[in-house]
Amino acid sequence: MADPRDHRLEPGTAAAIELRRGEVLRIGQVEGGQCADFNAFNLHDYKEHFHAGRTRAIHGLHPGEGSILWSAPPRERAMLTLIRDTAESNDLNYPRCTGLLYEYTWGLIDHPNCQDLLAEAEGQYGLTPDDVHDSFNLWMNTGVNPDGTLFVGANTSRADDHVEMLAQMDLLAVVAVCSADLFNTSNFALKHLDLSVREASEDERADDLLSDGSRLRNQRGLADFRVKEIKATRELRRDPGYKPNWSAQKLRSSDVELELSGEQEEMLDALLAGGQAGGSDAEAMRHAFFSWCFEAEATPDKMRDISS
């Protein structure tokens, strides 16, 4: 069997690759025009895996060089960083293709698909098809129409285009050659991809490898869970002895008097007239203030400096 850390991945296959923190996975085009589906799991806790939604919320629909692939809530930790991306045509809009897609659209029962390819590769590590998650779609040219529907355009990657991802933790990276040959996802053809793993350079480690001590309080791991054991049974049954522990935090509000200049009052009136900031001066002022905080990325420290 070929070494999954350094080999040419054939159409209709996928590879599961163990990466250690500080190693770099390179996925490269051979002929160009080939989409790849990507999964990732914490090598020491498979329940922590890549999350398309959190990554999409932070880096947008088309993450590129410099973007981080984040794990799912409640962990929400950096898993990999894209340190090279020569084509910059990646996607977080679409889920992985499945057998249902080809059967529903074309009436094909046994067409290869990314769900099954990823499941087969991950099965070597005791994972099931249920563990396959929404993928990071490399070299998938997508967009959003004015009516909100999605579209897939022609694949724009060329021969020798590549991405390099720096592992921020020990993880299992899973790469599938997308099987969507009946769509323009890979320009109606299936082609090879090259895989290789190397150690990060000193500069890459200095610039891109995040500190182990950078954990935030709301990046919660198994030690923070009340229920720590993974369910072994499939049925859902209520534990009558379990009492939810709701957060003790309570919201408070208070009135604050503000003096506005004539120009500021005119701006406030204009905001109210727009109809998007509430129906009172207080609501409009609150809308304006917190909109500014968001745009200025005002942290609690910045807020304290302003108030003082």
Image (tube, rainbow, N blue to C red):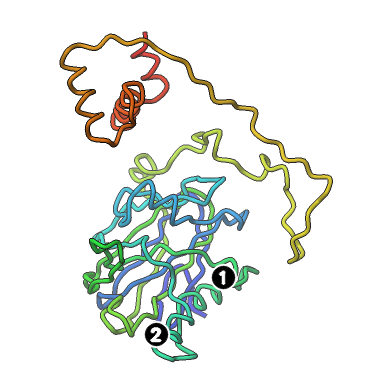
Q: Nearer the viewer, residue 262 or 134?
A: 262
Q: Answer with the quarter of the image where residue 27 lies.
A: bottom left
Vertical position of residue 272 compared to residue 26: above or below: above
Mark 2 lies on a secondary structure that is helix
Vertical position of residue 144 compared to residue 181: above or below: above
Mark 1 lies on a secondary structure that is helix
Tell me which amino acid carries mark 2: Thr
Q: Nearer the viewer, residue 52 or 216?
A: 52
Residue plotted at (22% across, 24% down): 269
Q: Position of residue 118 (x, y in %)?
A: 51, 73
Q: Position of residue 250 (x, y in %)?
A: 59, 26
Q: Are marks 2 and 1 in contact (CB under 8 Å)?
A: no
Name the residue tied to disc 2: 105
Residue plotted at (23% across, 35% down): 274
- Measured in 3D between alpha carbons, the distance from the residue under mark 2 to the one under mark 1, in whole angstroms, is 27 Å
Q: Answer with the quarter of the image where residue 306 lies.
A: top left
Residue plotted at (52% across, 78% down): 116
Residue lying at the far left of the rendered structure: 263
- Res 122 label: 1
